[in-house]
Image (spheres, rainbow, N blue to C red):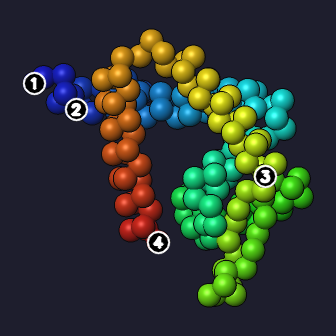
Amino acid sequence: MNKNQVTNEQHHFPWDHPRFRSWIAVARACQLMQQTMTRSLAHLDIKTPHLDILINLYRFDGISQQELARKLLVGRSNMSMLLPQLEKRGLIERRGDDKDKRVLRLSLTPSGRTLTEEAMEVQTGLIHKLMEDAPIEECEVVAQSMERLISLLLKDESELA
């Protein structure tokens, strides 16, 4: 049996199993990345959920609230809390859709665009600082593994719904 064929029977405790350890490592890394990004963005007075919204609006101007929620994997209630905060600060605007009055389209304001560009510089700098020693091939393997996990989790979620 090679090391890729390790079974649960060989390990008495779940935390001894490489798959379990990998899962926990991913969860801890995500938590620490969020905390680090929050600290790095503090001077801009935005949190990571705000940044996720702003970057998506930067990339997809005029996206609907529903599409944005789907991209961010959050529910309407989360959007209902976060969007007014950004709107009140003058960073985003919501406009009705010309074809469907039930749909609200989201866009960055000029000041929202400027802030998003500053925040993206912070984010990119942080990623570069933390990852500059990682070989590109390793980054590709990690990205592929995480994309596979995301796909499996999204599939499971849709099957449970």
Is residue 158 depicted above or below 53 in this figure? below
Q: Which residue is mark 2?
A: 7
Label 4 – label 3 distance at C-alpha? 39 Å
Secondary structure at numbered mark 2: loop
Q: Residue at x 66, y 30 (%)?
A: 121
Task: Answer with left or right where residue 7 lies relative to residue 115.
Answer: left
Query: Do the residues under discs 2 and 1 have CB atoms within 8 angstroms?
Result: yes
Circle nearer the N terminus (2, 1): 1
The image quadrant that residue 122 belongs to is: top right
Circle on res. 1: 1
Q: Residue at x 44, y 62 (%)?
A: 157
The image quadrant that residue 32 belongs to is: top right
Label 3 – label 1 distance at C-alpha? 60 Å
On the image, the x and y values in percent for residue 55 come to 63, 48
Circle nearer the N terminus (4, 2): 2
Task: Answer with left or right where residue 91 lies relative to residue 117.
Answer: right
Asked whether residue 12 is in view, the answer is no
On the image, the x and y values in percent for residue 119 come to 71, 36
